[in-house]
Amino acid sequence: TTASNSKELVVFFSLRVTNIVFSEDLFNKNSSEYRSLENRFIELLLPYLQSNLTGFKQFEILNFRNGSVVVNSKVKFGKSVPYNVTQAVQCVLEEFCDAAARRLDIKIDSHSLDIEPADEADPCKFLACNEFSKCTVNLWTKEAQCLCDPGYMTLDGSPCQSLCVVQTDFCLNGGECEIVPGHGAACREREQTTIPGLTS
C-alpha cells in the first residue's frame, strides 16, 4: 500500500514476545508495569522505524494482550510515501526481531508478525476486546474502541468485568448481584425477586 497525497497512511502491526510473562497489570495502561514495558518497546523500536522508514511520522503502542505478551501497535506516515509501506514495515520488523534476539534480552516470534494497512485492516482485531464487550469503529476517524456489555465495566483500560465483581457493594440489604444478559446488573432479593440495578 502506497500513501497518496490526500491523507496520511496508518499501518497496524502486532508481534509476540515469547520470553516475557503476561500479567494482569499489562491490561492497565496506568500501571507501572504497563508503562515500563511500553517505554521499553518505544525506546527499542522507535529508532528502527525512524531510521529505516521514509515519511515516518508516529509510533504508538495500542495495548498488550495475553499470549506470552502480544504487542499491538500503530505506525503513522506522512501524506506522500513513494514505496510499499506494508512491505517496508515487514522488513524493518524482521530486522528488529533478529537484532532483539542477538543483542537484546527480548525474544520475538518472527512468525507472529502481523502487518496490515489501516484502510484494509479490521481495527477491532488489534484492539482484542474480550467476551464481555463489543468493538465499535468510529466511521469518521476509523478509530476502534471496546464498549462493555450492559452490566460490565472497565477500570483503567482493563478488560470489561462484571459490575457484581467490580462493585462489591452494588446490592444493598443482603441482595445478591447477578448479570441479566442484555439488560445489565440486577439484585436478587432473598425472596428471589429480581430488582433492576444501575448499569454502567
Image (cartoon, helix red, strand yellow):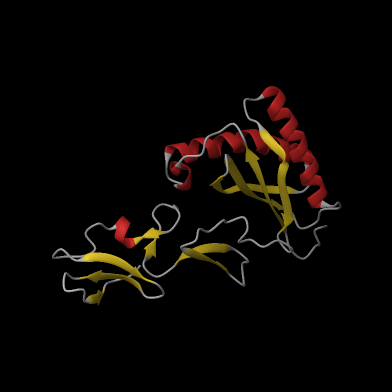
**Furthest-top residue in this view:** 103
Q: Position of residue 87 (x, y in %)?
A: 82, 48
Task: Judge by depth and name the residue closer to the eye, 123 or 88.
Answer: 123
The residue under the point 57% across, 63% down is: 144
Relative side of 114 to 200, left or right: right
Task: Give the quarter of the image for residue 9.
Answer: bottom right
Residue 30 to residue 122: above or below? above
Relative side of 160 to 54, left or right: left
Task: Judge by depth and name the residue closer to the eye, 133 or 47.
Answer: 133
The residue under the point 43% across, 68% down is: 149
- The total number of labels drawn is 0
- Viewport quadrant of the N terminus: bottom right
Task: Give the quarter of the image for residue 67.
Answer: top right
**Furthest-left residue in this view:** 173
Q: Position of residue 183 (x, y in %)?
A: 37, 75
Q: Position of residue 43 (x, y in %)?
A: 61, 34
Relative side of 9 to 29, left or right: right
Relative side of 53 to 83, left or right: left
**Furthest-front residue in this view:** 191
Residue 35 to residue 169: above or below? above
Residue 77 to residue 92: above or below? below
The residue under the point 72% across, 45% down is: 113
Task: Judge by depth and name the residue closer to the eye, 136 or 22.
Answer: 22
- Viewport quadrant of the C terminus: bottom left
The residue under the point 70% across, 27% down is: 101
Task: Give the quarter of the image for residue 155.
Answer: bottom left
Q: Position of residue 171 (x, y in %)?
A: 21, 65
